[in-house]
Amino acid sequence: MMGPAADRGRCRLMLRMPAWRAEPQQITTPDFLDVCEAYELIWNAIAAFDKAGATEKVEEFRTLAEFLEGEALLIALHIH
């Protein structure tokens, strides 16, 4: 079952990677949903760090977000 954070993370991934929008809607594996949830939490942290002016943390967490984007793509490629 997908929780709200995983659902928001999946939507965020679809917005960040428009050429890849159909795949995330079809994937329901626990690993993929974990990546989606982590992706949402990381972007929440990025917003909070940005608001606080913590530029170094923003960059660090953007790197983590990019890593999770790659993980999501790898999971999708492995499934299809």
Image: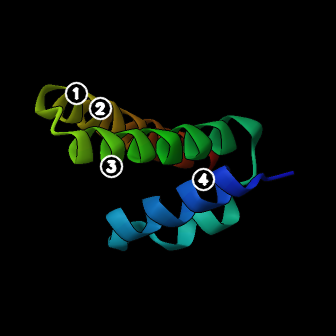
Residue that label 3 marks: 47
Q: Nearest the camera: 63 or 31?
A: 63
Mark number for residue 61? 2
Label 3 vs label 2: CA separation?
10 Å
Q: Can the viewer see residue 77 in this picture?
A: no
- Dot 3, how many residues are within 10 Å of its Cα: few (below 14), some (14-19), or many (20+)? some
Judging by the rendered image, the residue that carries numbered circle 1 is 57
Asked whether disc 1 touches disc 2, contact meaning CB atoms under 8 Å apart, the reply is yes
Question: Disc 4 and disc 3: Cα gap in Å?
Answer: 33 Å
C-alpha span from label 2 to label 4: 29 Å
Left or right: residue 57 compared with residue 24: left
Residue at the far front in the pictured view? 52
Relative to residue 47, is residue 56 depicted above or below? above
The percent coordinates of residue 15 (x first, y second) are 39, 70
Q: Of the numbered discs in the image, which one, if any, rests on residue 67?
A: none
Kindly identify the amino acid type of the residue bearing the numbered disc 3.
Ala
Disc nearer the start of the sequence (1/3): 3
Q: Secondary structure at mark 3?
A: helix
Secondary structure under the numbered disc 1 in the rendered image = helix
Callout 4 secondary element: loop
Task: Please tell me whether mark 2 sits on a helix, a strand or a loop.
Answer: helix
Label 4 vs 1, first from the N-terminus: 1
Marks 1 and 3 sit apart, C-alpha to C-alpha, by 10 Å
Q: Image quarter for residue 45?
A: top left
